[in-house]
Image: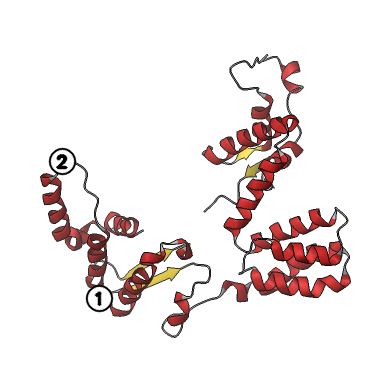
Amino acid sequence: MLRSILYDILHQHEASFYLFQSEYRRQAVLQDRCRGNHVEWSYESMRSVFSSLQNHTLAERLYIIIDAFDESDEKYRRDIFNLLSSLYSETKCCVVKVLIASRPVALFDRYRSQSHIISLQDETKSDISRLAGSYLERLQFPGFLDRAMEYIVENAQGLLLWVKLVGEELLAYDEEGRSEEDIFEFLRSLPTELEGFYERMFDKMRRNRADLRDRADLRDGVKIFRFVLFACRSLTVSELLHTLGIPDGPDSKFTASDESFQKKIPSERRIIDCGGNFLVIRRHCGTTNSYVDSFKFSN
């Protein structure tokens, strides 16, 4: 992260090289001693250069935006936060703004009086309630609604995506004819972190495709993920369905005639069924095409 920030600053303000110069020369000496082998800048070296930004005079304003701070290594998190705090509070030569996006971490509570903190869960509470209500009302358990709503709002951490995933799981569980108490216990058993939810979804896909007759589903699911995740742009539904219509494997035979090919193209439902709830089909504004996005893999 420090390397990325320092690179961007140097790239946008080449004259800031004077802040890097002494450390750069020291690294060049190490490079010579290693006979040209690549030398990684140490954390301490990058930290030293980053601290020198307090003397930065090349721009009137410096904005540093950091996302997913909660996913950082706990070993360095406190030190990095102190480093950022000292940068924006002690810099005299220009205005420095540091914007940090993060799920709740205990570290922020200690600095609440020194920083302006916007809690996403407070800002989106009404939206969370409306979305949760749209799912819970379909369960037709009046006595279940209030306590389930309270639980979801309390654990959502401002994440509408988590609420949507929970709602879909509850509806599927309700279709099995479960009782009100069973559904609430099932709700409490669901992961409250997105990473845990994704792992659960993948495990569910593996369990559901364990049967020999379902290997085709697993094969198509893997193929879908390969194309969606590694494409340089969003794929249209037609493009993805056409890839599924083309057989793969060393013993596969493919006849390129229109008539035979059309018979091999599955329906749009195939994408959702094999995508394990990881994929979404969106209709982009101003076009007649629908596109497939892997909206849960953006992290």
Residue 152 position by quadrant = bottom right
Residue 213 position by quadrant = top right
Q: Kindly identify the residue that appears in the image at 29 percent across and 59 percent down.
A: 6
Question: Disc 1 or 2, which lies upstream in sequence?
Answer: 2
Task: Tell me the distance, in whole angstroms, between the alpha carbons under discs 1 and 2.
Answer: 38 Å
Percent position (x, y) of residue 138?
Answer: 85, 62
Residue type of the residue flagged with mark 1: Cys
Coloration mode: secondary structure
Q: Kindly identify the residue that appears in the image at 73 percent across and 75 percent down.
A: 150
Q: Kindly identify the residue that appears in the image at 70 percent across and 74 percent down.
A: 126
Can residue 29 be seen in this snapshot? yes
Q: Label 1, on which residue?
A: 93
Secondary structure of the residue carrying tag 2 is: loop
In the visual, does 88 lie left or right of 268? left
The residue nearer to you, when weighing 51 against 76, is 76
Residue 85 position by quadrant = bottom left
Percent position (x, y) of residue 236?
Answer: 64, 37
Q: Label 2, on which residue?
A: 36
In the visual, does 140 lie left or right of 70? right
Residue type of the residue flagged with mark 2: Gly
